[in-house]
Image: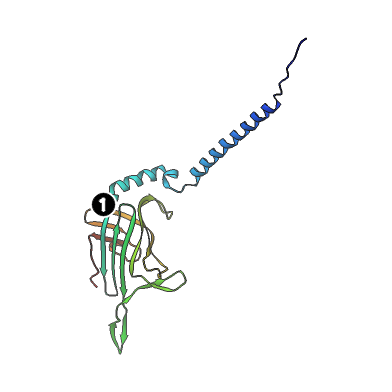
Amino acid sequence: MEFRVRYNTSGFNLKITIMLQLLKKTVFLILAALSVAACSSSDPEYVDPEAHEKTIQLNEKYGPVLVGTWHFEKIGEKQRYFERLTFQADGTLTGMRKWQKRELVTINGEQVYTDWEDVELGGWEDEDVKQNGTFSGTWKLRYWDPYGDGKQNYLELSAKYDNKDIDFAAYQYNAVFDYADETTLRFKSYYISGENGWMIFQRGEAEPSF
């Protein structure tokens, strides 16, 4: 008598097929996630190798030099301005600004200056806000083209006033960066025009003279 044994392999094959399908889906999801992560990055090194390399060189040359405290003061007939910036090695920033103005008016046929007043600028709700006080934020050196007029060296400054009642940024600005050494820091001004549009800071702690 001959016995024939039949093996039911249909269930086994089904399990193998399901496992392969799950493996394919897993691999696809991993690859898709990696692709999205690479494409969504806004850092310059992913989209512009030249900018990335020059940013590294910029930070190697000037990053350590910038760390410390700097001050700037300019006094004119109608405006006087003081600013102090302290750059930390971890990319954080603290500062202080004092900005005042006065007007030349005619009283009884004679020209006289008004008293000095703190400068006020329009806030988010069209409300004038005094631009004096301490602030804190971050800084970064970067070679790129934020405004579409060519790549340059920039000092990115982002800071808010420590007084929470001031709903106006102390800095939200990409300043064209020129150079820094042991005594001098130079970048394009935002509010105050210095020599040829540059603000020239001196190293060291200082208080306003006014």
Query: Is 4 in front, or is 85?
Result: 4
> Which residue sits furthest top?
1
Taking depth in this image into account, of 154 and 91 the one nearest to the observer is 91
Left or right? Give the position of 9 relative to 121. Answer: right
Query: Which element carries disc 1, helix, strand or loop?
Result: helix
Amino acid type, callout 1:
Val
**Residue 69 visible to the viewer:** yes
* Residue drawn at (24%, 57%) of the image: 184
**Does residue 47 appear to the left or right of 209 in the view shown?**
right
Quadrant where the C terminus is found in the figure = bottom left
Quarter holding residue 172 = bottom left
Vertical position of residue 118 compared to residue 88: above or below? below
State the image quarter where residue 88 is shown: bottom left
**Residue 76 placement (x, y as % from top left):** 26, 72
User: Which residue is identified by label 1?
Assistant: 65
- Can residue 154 be seen? no
Estimate the x, y position of residue 36 in percent, counting from the top left. 52, 44
Q: Measuring from the top left, give residue 16's x and y in whole percent.
A: 64, 29
Q: Percent position (x, y) of residue 130?
A: 37, 72
**114 or 9: nearer the eye?**
9
Q: Residue furthest front?
A: 1
